[in-house]
Image (cartoon, coloured by chain):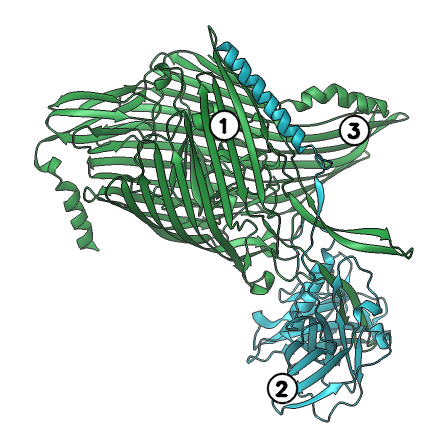
């Protein structure tokens, strides 16, 4: 019996050794191997930020690219067409594509017009933006957007001594009164201007979150729908307020743009954080990427 | 409702045993050699097959007609017992079964001989510890939880992880009980080993659906682990020396047949072995220091028999992991030091008092304590040459949970057709959801600032009643109600959870089963969907964070093919709500309120499980297959769209085989296959624009990754073969076992995680070109092991 046991022991050890040897290819201890990435699906990337009072349009139509590729105007531009439809009147017009790739604001794949049909953009109206790849490589992309209504800001009051800011510095404050419309779920974007230049603004109001830039605040009216909302915004306390002018730049924005801004900020803030969960950036471009945003803007002088 | 109540009472008390003269046989069933109580052993009338099973303490109660009765008892691995009693009064007996290991050298290892087609309970599997010990294990460390991962419906997380993902649930949804005490952190070494020392364990039971009403507080499963009680007759011991750790267990009587004890300890020792090498390395660099990692477990239990009616059990568990890195560099008359310390662990204890009120009524009163704590500190500073600290800056982080609980459970067996259980319990939870301590010592002045989350105190209350009711010979029902309440921050949550399991016996050992259960869970584990980090946070339901709920329905078919082979087929659907997850972009180590960092959502899972098992014979083992679909939906994640759960595993196969070549050589092998985990990856990017202000009319631009959907990419399938051989020899005074084997025997490159990278090269035109590539990181190639074990 002892002999049999010994034989089995040796056989087993031999088998183990054989299995090990068979497995010992070049990459036996290679614990890091390359695998095929998911196939890239090329898409149109559309961006537009249109103010009701604008007299010219700038729309970007570019494409996505594989990660790791160098981004430049060559590989992001393509032969595209952009048509905007006003759904209530079925009126439409094509925005002209600029041949010069890098023009105003360095927008890739830019479309531009300063010849907007009269009364084409109106608040409360629905619009459809159609992006077409004239070379038929990427699928057509569409975005449906409604022009938001303008909200009344009934008051904007400055207070010089307003406690401390979140970082412990002395603060002044600007309190604006928003007359929120009860029929809509409204979203706002706010910035504070000091002598016409943007200045850092913050608030502890739970309805607010930071925008992509720290001097922008994004507001969701869920907690004060239909009410007159007093929003206190903290700003730097300056030494000579008599010689300063404060203004509040207030935008009525779409829910899509609100989601886009919030998720874009979140992805940018966490791109190097291994302990955060991944953040997809919102897009309202069907079959494509990007954001088509319509907004109303007003600048309020602070008392 | 009242009518149903009276009808039930009428049914219970109108049994034949109450109308004719009948008497109750009660007592304990135990191992003849050690007096270790046997759980779920069958005790029955050998002629009518009316019977019952012993409870968690080996106690049974069986009421039979007066007169001669042929009583039988059976339990796997033991010789059947049969005796004839002339029943003229209530009788108390202790049934002692002899282990078959005493009868022959070849130990029979298998599922206990319970006819799977008989029980009303479905989705329940008892795994004998002897079988678990034979399964080849990673580095030779026998692991209870990893053995459970080989069962259908139970999935592992990643490579080597001991977390259990059961029917679409997450590891925190498993109620893991050690002698009735919940254990919160069940893993060592970032999940590679479980905290349960197999040498101290008597019995493991998994319930993954159709939960009996006596269990509550978790959504996914119950893993009920019972420690050995200690040999009442003589001193015995066991131990092993392995690559990673060594362990030793000693058990025996303090007062023969009255009081017994068991003590079991395990510790890793790589830190001790490498200490001289590491210190020498530091010295070569002109530094002093040490670094290392270890974990240990300690189990202890005392069992005392006061009388035939009263027994007391006191059990204790302590386990810790610790990683440390300390270095001091001499700089003139000073030493600059850097220190890092990461420690986490559990302490649990339980006192249980069994009392037999009368032959039909048994109670167990339990007091438990469970504490999990994570404590980490990182700092640097200056010492003088005597190692006194002159200045220091450090940051510490602690989190944890502590429970004190009391409960009383009753088993009432009014007649053989009913087994009624009822009880109440209360738990006081104290949650510590993460606290930072900033410490500074400068010029002999100390500054300490504490930041982070306030402790939360909460109380949980439970009550239940269930009846295992043999309605007819063919139809059996286990019906019950579990009620629970949770008091936190001035709010009181309540829940009523009905439970129902049914079995209808077909012919030839076949039966169909169905079950429905609702569950509520008041505590949450906030974790990343990756490896089981000790930094995972246990959090309470609060005013803002709602309790998790689920309901599950299952339909099954059980077929006892013959004495050796069993087949079980089950289909289930499970719905979960108020699950928690980090909001997109949120994560660990933030100072804001944890409630602001999480979001709640829903999940569901459906699947089919097949379990074909050969229970006895020289060749035994099983085949498990699971086909499942598991999804999550959170309003604030993935734009509200449904996405696959990270551990959504379409196919999961486990093959376990044991073969006894002879009395001295056992060979075992396992092969597992699973669809790859779902992970979130991006393969493309674009430039995103963002408008600035009216006055400069400029646009910001930034490059963003296009993440189309959460968990949009599947890693490669996971498959692995483990093999092992045990060489057993009975020496004069002890038995020794040499175990050798290999984990991942054909050295498959299994995916651990996948990441994107950029590789640059020069093309034919001399241009430097960058390519995006995906890389798969694997963890373990073939890992052989050898272990020496002994028993005496």
Residue B382 place in picture, x, y as percent: 82, 31
Say which colour chain A has.
Answer: cyan
Quote the CA–CA distance across marks 2 and 1.
Answer: 72 Å
Packing grade of label 3 (10 A; few <14, some 14-19, many >=20) is: some
Packing grade of label 1 (10 A; few <14, some 14-19, many >=20) is: many
> Which chain contains the residue that carries disc 3?
B
- Which residue does the image show at 70% across and 39% down from the upper left? A31
Q: Secondary structure at mark 3?
A: strand
Please give the residue where the numbered disc 1 appears in the rendered image. B668
Mark 2–mark 1 CB contact (< 8 Å): no
Packing grade of label 2 (10 A; few <14, some 14-19, many >=20) is: some
Check chain identity for marks 1 and 3: say if they share one: yes
Of tags 1 and 3, the one toward the viewer is 1
Q: Secondary structure at mark 1?
A: strand
* The residue positioned farthest toward the bottom in the image shown: A118
Quote the CA–CA distance across marks 1 and 3.
Answer: 45 Å
Q: How many marks?
A: 3
The foreground one among B89 and B206 is B206
Q: Where the N terminus of chain B falls, by quadrant?
A: bottom left
Residue A54 figure quarter:
bottom right
Check chain identity for marks 3 and 2: say if they share one: no
The foreground one among B73 and B716 is B716
The reply to whether residue B359 is visible in this rendering is: no
Instruction: Name which of mark 1 and mark 3 comes first in the sequence.
Output: 3
Please give the residue where the numbered disc 3 appears in the rendered image. B327
Does residue B358 appear to the left or right of B786 in the view shown? left
- Which residue does the image show at 62% across and 60% down from the upper left? B709
Q: In the picture shown, does residue A297 fall above or below A40?
A: below
> Which chain contains the residue that carries disc 2?
A
- Which residue does the image show at 70% across and 64% down from the upper left? A264
Please give the residue where the numbered disc 2 appears in the rendered image. A125
């Amino acid at each position: 019996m002892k002999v049999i046991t010994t034989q089995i022991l040796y056989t087993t050890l031999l088998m183990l050794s054989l299995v090990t040897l068979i497995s010992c290819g070049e990459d036996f201890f290679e614990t890091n191997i390359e695998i095929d990435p998911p196939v890239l699906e090329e898409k149109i990337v559309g961006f537009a930020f249109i103010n009701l009072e604008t007299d010219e349009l700038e729309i970007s139509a570019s494409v996505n690219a594989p990660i790791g590729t160098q981004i430049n105007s060559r590989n992001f531009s393509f032969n595209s067409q952009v048509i905007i439809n006003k759904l209530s009147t079925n009126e439409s017009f094509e925005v002209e594509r600029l041949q010069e790739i890098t023009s105003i604001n360095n927008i890739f794949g830019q479309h531009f017009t300063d010849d907007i049909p009269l009364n084409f953009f109106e608040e409360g109206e629905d619009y459809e933006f159609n992006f077409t790849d004239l070379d038929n490589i990427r699928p057509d992309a569409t975005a449906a957007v409604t022009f938001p209504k303008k909200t009344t800001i009934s008051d904007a009051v400055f207070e010089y001594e307003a406690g401390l800011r979140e970082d412990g510095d002395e603060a002044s404050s600007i309190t604006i009164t928003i007359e929120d419309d009860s029929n809509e779920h409204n979203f706002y974007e706010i910035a504070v201007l000091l002598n016409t230049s943007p200045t850092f603004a913050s608030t502890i109001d739970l309805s607010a979150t930071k925008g992509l830039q720290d001097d922008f605040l994004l507001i969701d009216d869920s907690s004060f729908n239909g009410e007159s909302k007093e929003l206190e915004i903290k700003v730097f306390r300056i030494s000579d307020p008599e010689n300063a002018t404060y203004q509040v730049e207030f935008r009525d924005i779409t829910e899509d743009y609100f989601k886009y801004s919030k998720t874009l900020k979140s992805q940018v803030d966490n791109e190097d954080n291994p302990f955060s969960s991944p953040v997809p950036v919102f897009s309202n471009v069907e079959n494509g990427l990007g954001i088509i945003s319509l907004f109303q803007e007003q600048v309020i002088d602070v008392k | 409702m009242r009518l149903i109540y009276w009808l039930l009472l009428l049914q219970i008390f109108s049994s034949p045993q109450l109308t004719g003269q009948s008497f109750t046989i009660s007592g304990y069933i135990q191992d003849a050699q050690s007096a270790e109580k046997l759980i779920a052993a069958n005790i029955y009338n050998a002629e009518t097959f009316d019977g019952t099973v012993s409870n968690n303490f080996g106690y049974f109660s069986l009421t039979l007609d007066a007169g001669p009765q042929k009583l039988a008892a059976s339990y796997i691995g033991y010789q059947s017992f049969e005796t004839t009693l002339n029943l003229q009064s209530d009788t108390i007996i202790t049934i002692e079964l002899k282990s078959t290991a005493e009868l022959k050298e070849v130990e029979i290892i298998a599922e206990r001989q319970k006819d799977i087609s008989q029980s009303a309970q479905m989705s329940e599997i008892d795994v004998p510890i002897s079988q678990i010990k034979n399964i080849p294990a990673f580095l030779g460390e026998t692991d209870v939880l990893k053995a459970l991962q080989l069962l259908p419906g139970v999935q592992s997380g990643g490579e080597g992880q001991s977390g259990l993902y059961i029917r679409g649930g997450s590891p925190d949804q498993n109620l893991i009980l050690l002698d009735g005490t919940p254990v919160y952190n069940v893993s060592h070494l970032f999940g590679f080993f479980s905290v349960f020392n197999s040498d101290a364990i008597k019995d493991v039971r998994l319930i993954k659906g159709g939960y009996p009403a006596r269990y509550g507080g978790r959504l996914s499963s119950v893993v009920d682990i019972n420690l050995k009680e200690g040999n009442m007759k003589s001193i015995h011991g066991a131990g092993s020396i392995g690559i990673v750790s060594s362990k030793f267990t000693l058990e025996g009587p303090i007062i023969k047949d009255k009081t017994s004890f068991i003590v079991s300890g395990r510790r890793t020792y790589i830190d001790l072995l490498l200490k001289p090498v590491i210190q020498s390395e530091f010295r070569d660099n002109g530094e002093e220091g040490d670094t290392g990692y270890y974990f240990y477990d300690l189990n202890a239990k005392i069992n005392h028999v006061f009388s035939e009616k009263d027994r007391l059990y006191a059990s204790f568990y302590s386990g810790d992991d610790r990683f440390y890195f300390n270095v001091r560099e001499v700089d003139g008359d000073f030493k600059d030091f850097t220190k890092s310390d990461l420690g986490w662990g559990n302490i649990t204890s339980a006192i249980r008092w069994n009392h037999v009120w009368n032959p039909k009524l048994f109670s167990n009163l339990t007091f438990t304590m469970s504490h999990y704590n994570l404590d980490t500190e990182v700092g640097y500073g200056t010492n003088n040459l005597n190692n006194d600290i002159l200045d220091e800056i450090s940051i510490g982080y602690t989190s944890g949970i502590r429970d004190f609980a009391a409960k009383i459970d009753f088993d009432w067996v009014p007649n053989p057709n009913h087994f009624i259980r009822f009880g109440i319990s209360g738990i006081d939870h104290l949650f510590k959801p993460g606290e930072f301590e900033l410490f500074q010592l400068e010029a002999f002045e100390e500054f300490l600032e504490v930041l982070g989350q306030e402790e939360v105190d909460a109380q949980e209350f439970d009550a239940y009643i269930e009846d295992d009711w043999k309605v007819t010979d063919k139809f059996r029902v286990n019906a019950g109600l579990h009620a629970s309440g949770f008091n936190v921050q001035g709010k009181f949550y309540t829940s009523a959870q009905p439970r129902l399991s049914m079995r209808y016996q077909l012919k030839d050992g076949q039966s169909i089963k169905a079950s429905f259960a609702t569950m509520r869970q008041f505590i949450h584990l906030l974790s990343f969907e990756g490896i089981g980090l000790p930094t995972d946070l246990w959090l309470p339901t609060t005013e803002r964070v709602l309790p998790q709920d689920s309901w599950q329905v299952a339909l099954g078919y059980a077929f006892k093919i013959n004495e050796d082979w069993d087949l079980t087929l089950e289909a289930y659907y499970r719905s979960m709500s108020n699950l928690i997850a980090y909001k997109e972009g949120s994560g660990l180590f933030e100072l804001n309120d944890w409630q602001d960092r999480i979001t709640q959502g829903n999940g569901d899972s459906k699947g089919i499980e097949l379990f074909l098992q050969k229970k006895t014979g020289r060749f035994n083992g099983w085949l498990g297959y699971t086909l499942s679909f598991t999804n999550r939906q959170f309003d604030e994640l993935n734009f509200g769209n449904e996405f696959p759960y990270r551990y959504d595993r379409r196919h999961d196969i486990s093959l376990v085989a044991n073969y006894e070549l002879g009395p001295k050589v056992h060979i075992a092998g396992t092969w597992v296959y699973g669809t790859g985990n779902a992970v979130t990856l991006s393969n493309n990017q674009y430039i995103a624009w963002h408008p600035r202000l009216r006055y400069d009319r400029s646009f910001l631009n930034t490059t963003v990754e296009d993440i189309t959907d959460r968990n949009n990419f599947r890693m490669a399938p996971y498959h692995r073969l483990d093999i092992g051989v045990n060489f057993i020899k009975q020496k004069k005074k002890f038995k020794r076992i040499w175990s050798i084997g290999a984990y991942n025997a054909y050295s498959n490159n299994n995916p651990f995680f996948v990441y994107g990278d950029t590789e640059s090269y020069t093309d034919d035109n001399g241009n430097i070109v960058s390519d995006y590539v995906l890389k798969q990181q694997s963890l373990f190639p073939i890992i052989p092991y050898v272990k020496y074990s002994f028993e005496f």
